[in-house]
Image (tube, rainbow, N blue to C red):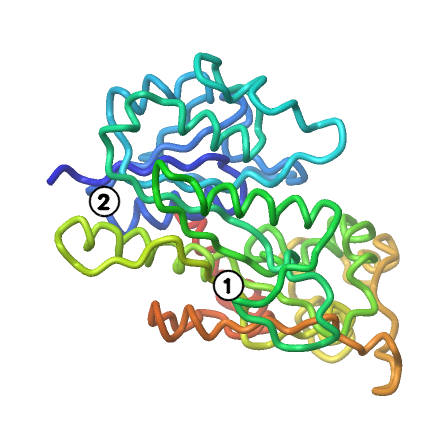
Amino acid sequence: MAPPQVLILGMGYVGTGLANRITSKHPDWTVTGTVRSPQSSTTGSKQRTPYPLDPRVATIEYGRVADHVATHGITHVLCTIPPASGNAASAPGTAGGAGHPLTSLESLQSLEWLQSLESLESLELWAGYVSTTSVYGDHGGALVDEGSLLLANGRNGACIAEERAWRECEAFEADVFRCGGIYGPYRNVLDSLVRRRGSGSASRRRGKAVTMRCHVLDVCRVIERRMVAWEEARSGAVWHGRRVYNIVDDDPIGRDAVEDYVVRRSKLFADYCALEGVEAREAIDAAGDVAPPLPGPSSPALWPEKRVSNRRIKEELGIELSFPSVLDGLESIVYRGDKRPFVV
């Protein structure tokens, strides 16, 4: 059996991290990722620093993917592209339909285009789609699992439609990975405060008693586990496809509490600033978005909209989280210089 050929649609934070992990753990696998242009390779849209990418990973523009699939084939494809929003969304089929080159970075168009490839018909293929736990919407603080109702609307509601399209695709069996807020090296609350990037999405997350999140390394480990299981199935192992997995840590501490801890109750932020060569007090004053002291337990700010179970990834996939709490992840970054999965 030929070595696996992995195609990652969207080389952003998760895509780059997964490409690095697969390449380091499975050197006989070939990994290729799509980018808007050669200049955009491994660069997050809001990042001042490119995400480090293993040089063994190939990056190609969307227009070259059809030739790549026809020449090399693919055994695994993962889509990390979020739903388009507002005017960014093109009409269905304008970029992804049969006979058209794919130039748009929009998930459903990627799926439509992927299904149109004639070379796909002869391939045994695993597919995965990276979604969000926001699809659950507001459950009044109840614990939700992969079988719970999806109550989200707006942009998060669009994720529900995209999940359904990938899961119901007849050309292949796609898994869905519902991730909490993804953080890790280069993208975390400490970096947000130092780089003054936290006032937008950070303020929208304020007032929540719980925030579902996950370290990017654990996201990559879960996806990798399913990719490996598919390879084992190709050799005769039992396979159950079209699965949904919540990827969240064990400690859904709210953003207010995280900021309160790293700035006021520990030396984490001060030590991180020292590593970055900035003054902690000046960084806080400039950012202007550090959470106020925590409210009392009876405050409406402490009422959660939901909690998300991660039981399935532990029981079904045997995952033991590398970082059960965001505080574990932040301490690993600051005190151990842990850059996984961006170590190349």
Please state the horizontal and vertical placement of residue 169, each as a whole percent of the image: 42, 40
- Element under disc 2: loop
Is residue 150 found left or right of 312 in the rendered image? right
Q: Position of residue 230 (x, y in %)?
A: 26, 51
* 90 relative to 322 in the view: left or right: right
What residue lies at 70% left-to-right and 61% top-to-bottom? 137
Q: Write the residue at 60% across / 44% down.
A: 161
* Distance in Å between CA atoms under marks 1 and 2: 26 Å
Front of the two marks 1 and 2 = 1
Q: Secondary structure at mark 1?
A: strand
Outermost residue toward the bottom in this view: 297
Can you tell which quarter of the image residue 183 is in?
Answer: bottom right
Q: Position of residue 96 (x, y in %)?
A: 51, 22
Return the mark for residue 247: 1
Which residue is identified by label 2? 27
The residue type indicated by label 2 comes to: Pro
Residue pictured at 68% horizontal, 68% vertical = 211
Residue 178 falls in image quadrant: bottom right
Give the residue type that dot 1 points to: Ile
Residue at 78 percent across and 70 percent down: it is: 208
Q: Nearer the viewer, residue 208 or 268?
A: 208
* Quarter the C terminus occupies: top left
Classify 10 Å Cα crowding around label 2: few (below 14), some (14-19), many (20 and above).
Answer: few
